[in-house]
Amino acid sequence: TRYAEEGLLTAATIIQVPHPTSERALDQQIMAALRPQAAIIQHSATNRRDDPSPQTLSFLGEIPVYSTSSGTVHLWTDGITWSVQQES
């Protein structure tokens, strides 16, 4: 949040959700500064901590969320456009 308050965050097209994805991983100020179009969450299908938290998911809102718990996530970009492929 300090970085958002100090204006040190710039827009990001895709974010990797901070780990651990606890209640303090993201907040509204950070999301407003980043304005991501999609998010990737890296965690195991055998995760025992119930990551991501419901609060983290609520901060992500309606943007597409890709998770490695469902398989490998491939991200491609040419610097302008991007695409994601989720393996199962």
Image: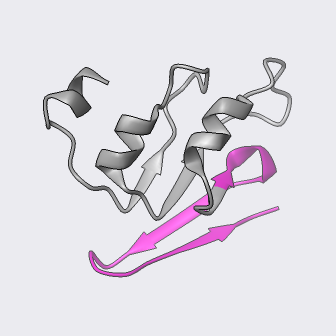
Q: Is residue 27 left or right of residue 74?
A: left
13 is within the stretch colored magenta: no
Judge whether 64 appears above or below 42 on screen. below
Query: In the picture, which quadrant includes the C terminus?
Result: bottom right
Residue 78: x and y, percent? 31, 79
Residue 37: x and y, percent? 46, 65
Labels in figure, total: 0
* Residue 42 visible to the viewer: no
Judge whether 58 appears above or below 36 on screen. above
86 is within the stretch colored magenta: yes
Residue at horizontal 57%, vertical 64%?
A: 74
Query: In the picture, which quadrant includes the N terminus?
Result: top left
Residue at horizontal 75%, vertical 34%?
A: 44
Judge whether 69 appears above or below 84 on screen. above
Judge whether 87 appears above or below 58 on screen. below
Residue at horizontal 68%, vertical 34%?
A: 43
Residue 84: x and y, percent? 57, 71
Residue 28: x and y, percent? 44, 37
Numbered range of the magenta stretch: 66-88
Q: In the depicted view, which residue is nearer to us: 85 or 65?
A: 65
Residue at horizontal 58%, vertical 61%?
A: 63
